[in-house]
Amino acid sequence: MANIRGASEICKRHGVPLFLDACRFAENAYFIKLREKGYQDKPPQEIAREMFSYTDGCTMSAKKDGLSNIGGFLAVNDDALSQRTKNI
């Protein structure tokens, strides 16, 4: 979590949106639970919510874990950013 929090602070300072690769978010939440002080008693769902709270959005490749042969998504938590991504 310290790495995500630190990356978020740097991105905010420089006006750069931070996107999380959501393909492995559950495993990362579990590793945080096991390895970072203060998270041992928190459920992975709560840890994941905190992880995503430091980002502006996320991407997920459905192909990466064999969920499908093609596809994925881009999610953002800001309407203006959402409009900008539609024009890419």
Image: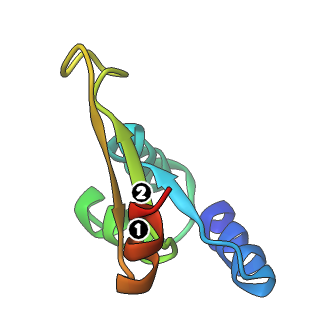
Q: Nearer the viewer, mark 2 or mark 1?
A: 2
* Relative vertical location of residue 63 with respect to residue 85 in this rendering, above or below: above
Q: Is residue 27 visible?
A: no
The disc label shown at residue 58, or none: 2
Amino acid type, label 1 = Phe
Quadrant for the N terminus in the image: bottom right
The disc label shown at residue 52, or none: 1
Mark 2 touches mark 1? (CB < 8 Å)? yes
Q: Secondary structure at mark 2?
A: strand
Amino acid type, label 2 = Cys
* Relative vertical location of residue 7 with respect to residue 10 in this rendering, above or below: above
Residue at position x 41%, y 68% from top? 52
Find residue 46 and report its horizontal and vertical position in percent. 28, 69
Q: Is residue 38 left or right of residue 71?
A: right
**Which of the pair 73/12 is nearer the observer?**
73
Q: Is residue 9 left or right of residue 19?
A: right
**Which of the pair 54/80 is nearer the observer?**
80
**Which of the pair 5/85 is nearer the observer?**
85
Find residue 11 and report its horizontal and vertical position in percent. 72, 74
Q: Secondary structure at mark 1?
A: helix
The disc label shown at residue 30, or none: none
